[in-house]
Image (spheres, rainbow, N blue to C red):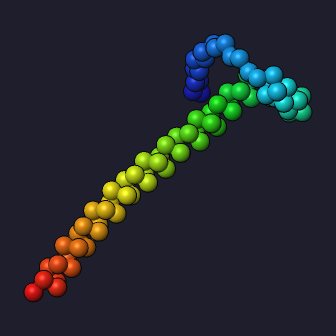
Amino acid sequence: MVHTIVIMKTISLKIDDAIFGETEKILSGIKRSRNRYINEAIDYYNKLQRRLMLEKQLKKESELVSNESLFVLREFEEFEYGD
């Protein structure tokens, strides 16, 4: 049997009253601790941010490839029609 050791960090967190109130209402209806709920929310948001960062990087690289492709296409056209 394999056991995984999870190391946790303790942080102090200030939450807007409205967000805290909404969170408490949600927590009263689900079977999850506040700590687990906040951990899952941060994990979800981290995944979203990584996806957005990757999307931004892919768009940038796509533009670079697109510009290079247009340059190569022009080169071929000049070669083909240059005679």
State the image quarter where residue 24 is shown.
top right
Name the spot of residue 73 as percent of width and height, x first: 25, 73
Q: Find residue 68 and report its horizontal and vertical position in percent.
A: 27, 62
The N terminus: image quadrant: top right
Q: Is residue 83 above or below residue 13?
A: below
Q: How many marks?
A: 0
The residue lying at 88 percent from left, 29 percent from top is 25
Seen at 59% across and 21% down, the residue is 6
Q: Residue at x 40, y 52 (%)?
A: 60
- Residue 27 can be seen in this image: no
Where 35 falls versus 62 (above or below)? Answer: above
Q: Is residue 59 visible?
A: yes
Screen quadrant of the C terminus? bottom left
Is 28 situated left or right of 49 in this image?
Answer: right
Residue 46 appears at what percent x and percent y? 58, 35
Q: Quadrant of residue 29?
A: top right
**Residue 16 position within the rendered picture, expressed as x and y whole percent measured from the top left:** 76, 23
Task: Work out whether 28 lies above or below 48.
Answer: above
Above or below — where is 72 with respect to 41?
below
- Left or right, 43 with respect to 71, comes to right
Name the residue located 19 percent from the left edge and 73 percent from the top edge.
75
